[in-house]
Image (tube, rainbow, N blue to C red):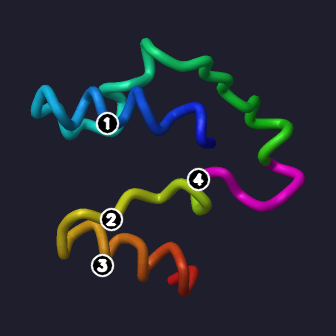
Amino acid sequence: RRTCLEPVRRALARGDRRVRSFFPDVRIRTPQREYLSRYGDPDEMFLNVNTMEDYLRYRKVDSHE
């Protein structure tokens, strides 16, 4: 949202590049698993892929091997 723009700019200006760095400056709501489940499997929707091992693990989940 646009309301996050200035808090993100401030975080970047102080050299903080963590995604969560601006959370204290904005209103955060955490959706409940039941709500997310309406749209798919939350474990698959929010799968984090940073390494080759993560990718290979994702491929295994994706192909249901």
Circle 1 — which element?
Answer: helix
Nearest to the observer: residue 52 or residue 29:
29
Residue 52 x/y as whole percent: 18, 75
User: Residue 42: within the magenta?
Assistant: yes
Image height of 38 relative to 17, above or below = below
Q: Nearer the viewer, residue 27 or 49?
A: 27
The residue range painted magenta reads: 37-43
Q: Amino acid at mark 2?
A: Val
Q: Position of residue 23 (x, y in %)?
A: 44, 22
Q: Which numbered disc, 1 or 3, marks the residue that appears first in the sequence?
A: 1
In this image, 11 relative to 28: left or right? left
Q: What residue does disc 4 label?
A: 43
* Residue marked by disc 3: 56
Q: Residues within 10 Å of mark 1 (few under 14, many from 20)?
A: few
Which of the numbered marks, if any, corresponds to residue 9?
1
Q: Residue furthest left?
A: 15
Q: Quadrant of residue 55?
A: bottom left
C-alpha distance separating marks 4 and 1: 30 Å
| Numbered mark located on residue 49 in the image | 2
Q: Where does the image place residue 6, in percent across and percent down from the top left? A: 42, 31
Q: Are marks 2 and 3 in contact (CB under 8 Å)?
A: no
| Residue visible at 75% across and 29% down in the picture | 32
Mark toward the start of the polypeptide (4 vs 3)? 4
Q: Residue 47 at what x, y percent from top left?
A: 47, 59
Please say if 23 is above or below 18: above
SS label for mark 4: helix
